[in-house]
Amino acid sequence: MQASNKVDVQQYLDMVTKYKWHGVIPASILMLILAIATSFLPKVYKSSCLVEVDRGAIANPLKTERDRPRNLSEYLTFFSENAIKWSILSQVVDKVGVNTILENSDKYNLRTISKLIGLVGPVRESGKSVDQEYLRKEAVINLLKKEITFTQKPPKFLLLEYSGTDANINAKVLNTLVAMLIEERTKAGLAQAGQTYDFIRAEMESYRRKLESAEVNLREFKEQHVTELPSNMNINITQLMNDKSELMAAEAEIKELTSRVQYIDEQLKKQKELIVSEVTLEANPMLAMLNQRIIDAEIELTNLITNYTELHPRVIETKSRLANLKKQREGVTESTLNSETTILNPVYQQLTQDKQNALLRKELLTSRAGHLRQNIDENTARVRSMPSQEQQLLTLTRNYEVTANIYNMFLQKLEEARLNEKLIAAATDEDSFRVIEYARASLRPIAPVRLKLFLIILLIGTGTGAGIVALFNYFDDSLKSIEEAKEFLGKPFLGTVPSLSEKNNNGSIYTYLVTKGRHVSRIL
């Protein structure tokens, strides 16, 4: 085995020695060309921006803790997807420039080479120039989606990274992206708060006029019937006033809930129900979420029963919501889901839950309003037996008090909406985020790595030279060993005689053997 291995090694050494220049020269030329080519590669720089995604740096007193998203990791994922949507990146491209981003992303000088050989030229003015610019913009947006990376940093940070040939452009792209996100969040929050503020203000103006009219009517009636005013109120009249007051409040709340449902429907059209998540196997998140909500509802129901009776509206509403959640849980399986496909959008889920709560509340209020109307009709029939002046006074007083209560309610709601608008202007609640560190122009390139390129070129050159030597040896049909000679001649093989000639630099030995060593040849 040792002799065989020595013969094999010697055979390979002979092959390399015989064709060494056939492999060394092409390999050297190839390595030289690659080395020259890599020297023209541009330097690549990377800029990063650190963002803290906070679900409410300023606590909003108008929202409960239950309304906030529970899973911050899912919200960070949704935030990353929302940050690279078309509308945001389109504004970034418009501000930075299509050509600037393309040149910054040319990490291998492909555009420069294409311009030199004439493959890329200036855009000609023609009827299709607008379409061409649109296609180029779409291509740049898709390029930014691939090159801008988001990395989650516990507990609630996102690291945005972008690389290119110009460090200043890298920083400009990231800072422009962050600025667009801040502007969009602020506009969206202010728009929602503004709609609520305008709606309440319009309703309050209407009730202000009603209140002024009720005050005038009540004052005029008292001036005309000073001696006919009743000294006390009947129980039925008091109940009638309370029922009508509660009915008007319920109708006003139903109207507000209808507007809320319409706004949620508009927001649902802008959101996706599912978003892509990482590849993990986990239990059905819908089942866990429903179980948690059922537990919260049962705790809330226990607290309400402790303080109120079974007929209290909040107790009835909580029981109805608990039954609805249990019914939803019955339709959810306990199978294991693969989150590699999609996960539920937390924003879409929250909007859907808000819509369900609003519809449930509206249904309860509608049912309650029906009962109140029935009670009002019964009490009205009893009141008709009272003297006309007393009944008219009670009616005017009731209208005034009910209108005043509703006006005060709208006044309070208006102040809450104004406060909410200020909070949103300072921090857009759960959609808010804070820039910890803006992107800066890095002076240290991340590519190309010269040592790594040198090793790759050396490996390519060595492999190329070895391949050429192997090819030459493969196509060489001469006898390369004693075994091949025995097999080819088919006769016994006694030994080998070295080739001696002046052509092979063996001139002195060859002359000596011819002139003085003939007896040696005879003996041999």
Image (cartoon, rainbow, N blue to C red):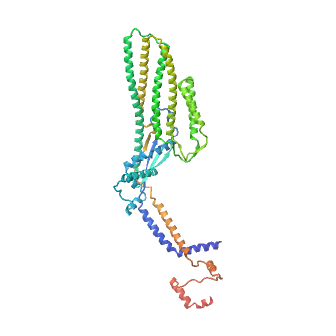
The answer to which of 130 and 430 lies nearer the viewer is 130
Residue 13 vertical placement versus 435 (above, below): below
* Residue 304 relative to residue 168: left or right: right
Q: Position of residue 311 (x, y in %)?
A: 56, 23
Which residue: 57% across, 79% down? 478
Which residue: 38% across, 13% down? 221
* Residue 37 relative to residue 492: left or right: left
Which residue: 52% across, 86% down? 508
Q: Quadrant of the N terminus?
A: bottom right
Residue 97 vertical placement versus 243 (above, below): below
Q: Is residue 418 visible?
A: no
Q: Quadrant of the C terminus?
A: bottom right
Q: Position of residue 5 (x, y in %)?
A: 62, 72
Residue 456 vertical placement versus 493 (above, below): above
Q: Residue furthest top?
A: 227
Q: Position of residue 495 (x, y in %)?
A: 62, 82
Q: Is residue 487 visible?
A: yes
Q: Residue furthest left?
A: 125
The answer to which of 358 and 60 lies nearer the viewer is 358
The answer to which of 2 and 410 lies nearer the viewer is 410
Q: Position of residue 237 (x, y in %)?
A: 48, 15
Q: How many marks?
A: 0
